Image: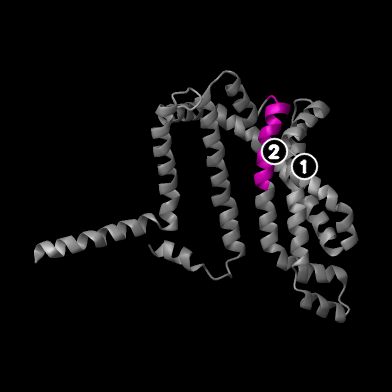
Amino acid sequence: MQATLETSRVPAAWIRIVHLLTTPRAARLTAPILIIVTWQLVAPLIGSTLLPMPIDVLEEFIDLAIEGTVWSAFAISFVRLGIGLALAVVIGVVVGLLLGLSPRAEAFAHDFLVIGLTFPYLIWGIIVSMWFGFGDAGPILVVFIAAVPYVIVNMAEGVRDAPRDLIDMARSYDAPRLRVIRQVVVPSLSPFFFAALRYGLANGWKGLVLAEVFAATSGAGWEIAGMRDIGNASGVVAYALYFAFFSILVERLVFGRLSDWVFRWRPRRPEAARAVNA
């Protein structure tokens, strides 16, 4: 009888373990662990210096942090990213509101937005290096060019998605246009504004790295290019991990918390509640 109870507990225990490992919170830990294990198994089979072992990358990762070069490089890149993204948000919000409110303006700017959304960042990096040399202006301009179309498009869609019944009601009472925009349109733009920030940051970040490779003599992208030139594959992968680390840090500490505060009135999703209670 005792043996039967013990065997019946084993499947229940395994089910409990599997449930814990498949929760959204646990998946954030198990996913990178699976990637590292796969990496460790595949790297020896390839037998190439272009795919370093995880331990070599970890040593390079720690050495960069101790030397301090990674912090100074990313500090320069963050300043460029912040300036370019701020300009993109300010100009993109204004232009997006205009395009959302005016079909004529939207028709005028449509083709330019398509070009901005699809034009390769690599070409922009080469062009700005010829125009501005190897200073800060080129990378900042590429961040702006990469981010502003996404801000404009999201803000314009947000204006079009504004509740038409409330807008029509305000107009029927002869409410001033600026008051309608401030009290009806703008409050409905919050989800689109956060989407614009996320897309703008992601694409500005990618554009910045390419610009620093081709049009800068400092910054994280320039450091990666230098390590590539000397054949330091571990250093390149270590810098890539720092990019991933800072991206997650910004998402969790900035956008995640700000979004939770702005949308605190929304009911929590069931899966999120289960993850917290797990």
Front residue of 26/89: it is: 26
- Image mark for residue 7: none
Q: Is residue 90 visible?
A: yes
The quarter of the rendered structure image containing the N terminus is bottom left
Report which residue position mark 1 lands on. Answer: 145
Q: Residues within 10 Å of mark 2 (few under 14, many from 20)?
A: many
- Image mark for residue 207: 2
**Which residue occupies 47% across, 65% down?**
271
Q: Is residue 53 visible?
A: no
**Residue type pointed to by label 2:** Gly
Q: Are marks 2 and 1 in contact (CB under 8 Å)?
A: yes
Label 1: element kind: helix
Report the label total.
Answer: 2
Main SS, magenta region, reads: helix
**Which residue occupies 65% across, 38% down?**
78
Picture coordinates of residue 226, whole percent (x, y): 61, 22
**Residue type pointed to by label 1:** Ile
**Which residue occupies 69% across, 38% down?**
207
The outermost residue toward the front is: 45
Q: Which residues are drawn in magenta?
A: 201-217
Q: CA distance from mark 2 to mark 1?
A: 8 Å
Earlier in the chain: of badge 2 and badge 1, it is 1
- Residue 250 left/right relative to 182: left
Q: Residues within 10 Å of mark 1 (few under 14, many from 20)?
A: many
Q: Is residue 207 magenta?
A: yes
**Which residue occupies 60% across, 27% down?**
224
